[in-house]
Image: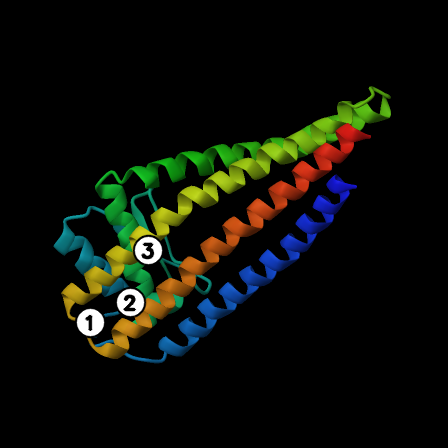
Amino acid sequence: MGIYTGYIICSCLIVFTILIAILAETKVQGAFSKYSKVASSLDLTGEELALRLAGEQGVNISVGECSGSLTDHYDPSAKMLVISQGNYHSKSIASQAIVAHEFGHALQDAQGYAPLKIRMLTIKISNFISRLLLPVIFIGFLLEILLFTGVGNIIIYAYVGLYTFSVLVSLVTLPVEYDASRRAKKILLDMGASSQEEIVATDELLNSAALTYVASLLVSVAYLFRILMLLFMSRRN
């Protein structure tokens, strides 16, 4: 009875954490929409800001443009800061906060920031496991059909492995993202984006973005516990 109760509680936690994730994403979208209409005192487009920072900080990266909204990212393998189309051409507070944050990742890479290296490694392993998951599930079902008693549990073990790495990736991601935001705030202040509105806007936008990573961790943990409950129920039966 206890295990079944635990399973139900974990399922409820999943719903709760998903709601938190939706709320976090809504906050990011709201802050971005609000401050993308407010011009920054720096009077630089996202592209100009990225190039200027790269020159001033002595970081050898290229700057590119991509489609989509809030698809900005730093690609360590290509040494490239990729800016979404809207932010690439915008001089808003929102675009500069996001570009500065992504440049924070470029600084981490240039300085050999250990958590970023660990994050890159865990992401590669997690992606590899994700590719293996489908054939593992197929084999598990096949073995069950062939009446190999209990071998079908391999499906659950595969999920446990996947979500364990998902939790690990989320855990490693948190300090990386918070550090990039800390660097972004300092960069913008040093460049002169020091009005009260710019400080408040940058804090609100980057803190909201960080909350999405916290929410992602909570969702992964909730799913992992639910799968562990499934495993315990299966072994008990």
Does label 1 or label 2 sit earlier along the sequence?
2
Task: Please name whichever residue, 189 or 124, is drawn nearer the observer in this view of the structure.
Answer: 189
Type of amino acid under label 1: Ala
User: Which residue corresponds to the image point at 30% horizontal and 49% vertical from the top-left?
Assistant: 105
Q: Is residue 52 left or right of residue 226?
A: left
Whether residue 63 is visible to the viewer of this picture, yes or no, is: no
**Amino acid type of the residue tagged 2 in the rendering:** Gln
Label annotation for residue 97:
none
Q: Which mark is residue 64?
A: 3
Label 1 or label 2, whichever lies nearer to me, is 1
Quadrant where the C terminus is found in the figure: top right
Residue at 19 percent of width and 48 percent of height: 59
Q: Residues within 10 Å of mark 2 (few under 14, many from 20)?
A: many
Mark nearest the camera among 1 and 3 is: 1
| Residue ID for mark 1 | 193
**Mark pair 2, 3: CA separation:** 15 Å
| SS class, disc 1 | loop
Which image quarter holds the N terminus? top right
Amino acid type for the residue under numbered disc 3: Gly
Q: Is residue 92 left or right of residue 195?
A: right
* In this view, 114 is above or below 29: above
Q: Nearer the viewer, residue 45 or 95?
A: 95
Query: Looking at the image, do the residues carrying marks 1 and 3 touch, with CB atoms under 8 Å apart?
Result: no
Q: Secondary structure at mark 2?
A: helix
How far apart, in angstroms, are the residues tagged by discs 1 and 2? 10 Å
Q: Are marks 1 and 2 in contact (CB under 8 Å)?
A: yes
Could you say which quadrant of the image residue 101 lies in? Answer: bottom left
Q: Which dot marks residue 96?
A: 2
- Find the distance from the CA under tag 1 to the CA under tag 3: 24 Å
Q: Quadrant of residue 83?
A: bottom left
